Amino acid sequence: MRRPTSWAEALSVRAAAPDLLPIAGGTDVMVELNFDRRRPPGLLDLTRVPELATWTVFDGTVELGAGVTYAQVVADLGDLLPGLATASRTVGSPQIRNRGTVGGNLGSASPAGDAHPPLLAAGAVVELESVHGRRSVPVSEFFIGVKRSVLEPDELIRSVRVPCATGPEQFSKVGTRNAMVIAVASFALRVDPGRRRVGTGIGSAAPTPRTAPEAETFLAREIEAADAWASRDPLPAPVVRRFAELVAAAASPIDDVRGSASYRRHALTVMATRTLGWAWDEYRQGVPA
Amino acid sequence: MGTGPGVLTDPVTTAVRGGVGDSPRRPDGTLKVTGEFAYSSDLWMDGMLWGLTLRSPHAHARVTRIETARALAVPGVFAVLTHEDVPGTNLYGLEIRDQPVLAADRVRYQGEPVALVAAEHPEAARRALDLVEVDFDPLPPVTDARESVHGTSPSLHPGGNVVRHVRIRHGDEHARADVVVTGDYEVGMQDQAFLGPESGLAVPSPDGGVDLYVATQWLHVDRDQVAAALGLAPELVRITLAGVGGAFGAREDLSIQVHACMLALRTRRAVKMVSSREESFFGHVHRHPARMRYEHGATRDGRLVYVKAETILDGGAYASSTPAVVTNAATLGAGPYDVPNVAIDCYGAYTNNPPCGAMRGFGAVQAAFAYESQMDRLAAVVGIDPVEIRIRNALTEGSRIATGQRVDSAAPVAELVRRVRDMPLPPSADGDLRAMPGGVANTTHGEGVRRGVGYAVGLKNVCFSAGFDDYSTARVVLEAVAGEPVVLVHTAAVEVGQGLVTLQAQIARTELGVARVTVATADTQVGGAGSTSASRQSYVTGGAVQAACRQVAEEVRRRAAERSGADPGALDLAGGKVVTRDGVPVADMADLLGDDRVERTVEWRHRPTSPIDPATGQGDAHVQLAFAAHRAVVDVDVELGLSSTGWCATRRSPTT
């Protein structure tokens, strides 16, 4: 177990010993170790790196340190990043939310990670760093397979930069029970009047978390065409229906113990319809973001 | 001296605190809420070894070879044991000894123990476990209990695949009715999922015996099974209850008991075993899955004429308590209703599914799902309210149940249903996500939500049934310590969280009028108390403690009478003193006892029950019946198939 106490030290340990498994809250890693699914030669404990544990806002963007816990997100970021805060509230139990981190969620890169859909919907950017330098990867390009990401063996996740919400955000998750549950399917939506775009994120319904780009483009175009950003008129039912269809079509779910592929598509349709309804209602009421 | 007039003339009028009717604190309460309570998984002894179990990955297979040499060569490993190392009989079981301690030539379920390892460190034990070589020759598993019962599957045990068949014939088997509803019902497997996994510590003793500290439900039956498997006299196996983290039936069967003792006796070291959460699911019995076909016949106004049923319970690979579960599902199978004609056939089957045994409700639960679903259907066909159909058919005191047994105590079934019906309905979620289907996962704000309200009643036998010699033993000692009377209560009754330790002390305080009562840790150094199950310990061990206290009290009164010349029948014990009926003290108990102690051990039995007739299932099989009514209110999101947590209202009788 290596326990660096600064970011620079963490990077040099990572460079020298890339086999060490980085651990933050341990809510994924410890389960794998306890079930003997993984036997890394050692652990790289990132919990003592102070740079990771904070978040800042600069120029309309939240820079969220990789070690910020879900509990902190729920407590601090409900106004700036309501979608991420809603998703964080659905993670595990209070104990898990006190330990688990958004950076750890990215590191695990599970298709079911709860933080991923709102980060995708927000167009967030993951900041990766090694002793050789820093690079920025849009979260939509970060995941490359089931539990695989572009993270190189000498890199660590420094932070994730998330543009602040300018309008309503929603997150919805179907589980096999109402709490402390992994997603059967989840969906995040950002209605972004500031940038005149719509963001989406789909969880647990494809090999990686992913966006629904056609749905985003379609809805943004329809809103634009109807001048609804300005008028805040109700969205026609066929538009909502088509949006939901396009969201479901963007997924490529599988049948597994938690649910069937067809249920997941159906659930995405329902979640997309409802979340768009709630978000647009909120926008029409002019509730400031 | 406490006999001087100044001390003893004031009447004792206040009952001792913490007796029956009071609500004293649990002795383990503070420890449990502060996380300080020592559960069986916290047991520790310097120099102890860690034991692990190798389990079958196959549901059904021949075992053709077991090779332990590589595992034994792992540094830090002290023993690797197989069926060849079982010192006594390699078979155990609660009712039928059909389950190997370690599989010999055949495994019958996935998770069946095959080999044991003891090592200095759990990690070394894990590594050694991976190096035990077992050759399995997989066989087709028997997975369908119905086929198993109908004899179309290969036999898994010498006597065939029917563990038990109970046949109930009450009234006219061929009764006919104007209104008939039939239904097929299925209940899946459930698990008790107690929080404290199977765990214990076995310590070899110099006399060749073993001391076992373990979380269990029934110390003496554990002891008898462990002794037989170890080939030891029962008195050489001493079992002491360790902290129990929940039980719910799943600790009635052996888990690590024999295994830990085998490893301890072989290594001559203390051996600790603790299941992981995942292993725990393989390490204990589950609730029997059931397939039930019910036919209810009724008059046009919804009065039951007959109930016919066939129930098949999947007992899995070994018998465990399947025979008794079958008896319950059959004898209670018509529900808490007045039914003149009942014909039920209930079977328990062997399959290669995980073994099933005791879980709360014990056969009564599966049947209730079927007969209550039938009552809802009947209500719909007859066109009356589901509550009304239950009230119209409710069992009352004096009614007979399916076994012909007359209910000779309170049976307020109709009243229970009325009470749950009359309770206010929970409010609608109204914006609070936590009360919505999906909860804070934010799947609905009311869209797609429909409310369902359901009612069910049920009945359950209290204590062991069908002629079982059901008793408990209590040893009660009264002595004076530092001038104060002190009571020790010693039983083998297991506290699993239900409050039995508190209750034993309450009974002793009330019976003996002594404030200071210590309840000894339950162990096998006193006579058997029976299992902590079947809602029986308050009744049976409570009865034994009361009876033993009364014998102690009688002796104290005799001594007081001898000294004072009073009639012993006119004396009571209160506030640490012997008093007259008017509360006037005649002797101080501590003073009366001096250096002596009064000790009594009593074996206490409830009224006997009878076995049921093998052809008709008739007989007074049950001591007493308990009744329950529930109302469940659940909001369902019909588009996503999610439900709210639900609100359940419950009333039961007797209230315990």
Image (tube, coloured by chain):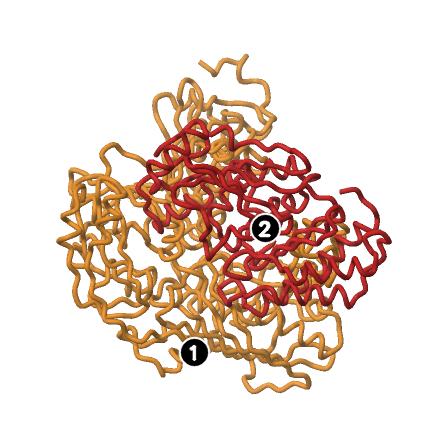
Chain colours: A red, B orange
Q: Secondary structure at mark 2?
A: loop
The amino acid type found where label 2 is placed reads Ala
- Which is more toward the observer, B650 or B546? B650
Residue B565 horizontal side relative to residue B213, left or right: right
Subunit under mark 2: A
| The label number, if any, that marks residue A179 in the structure image | 2
Residue B603 horizontal side relative to residue B406, left or right: left
Q: Secondary structure at mark 1?
A: helix
Residue B632 horizontal side relative to residue B548, left or right: right
Residue topped by disc 1 = B146
The amino acid type found where label 1 is placed reads Arg
Residue B334 horizontal side relative to residue A33, left or right: right
Where residue B116 sits in the image (x, y, percent)? Answer: 23, 52
Subunit under mark 1: B
Instruction: Please check whether the numbered discs 2 and 1 fall on a single chain.
Output: no
Where residue B294 sits in the image (x, y, percent)? Answer: 56, 78
- Which is more toward the observer, B271 or A282? A282
* Crowd class of label 1 (few under 14; some 14 to 19; many from 20; radius 10 Å): many
- Which is more toward the observer, B207 or A46? A46
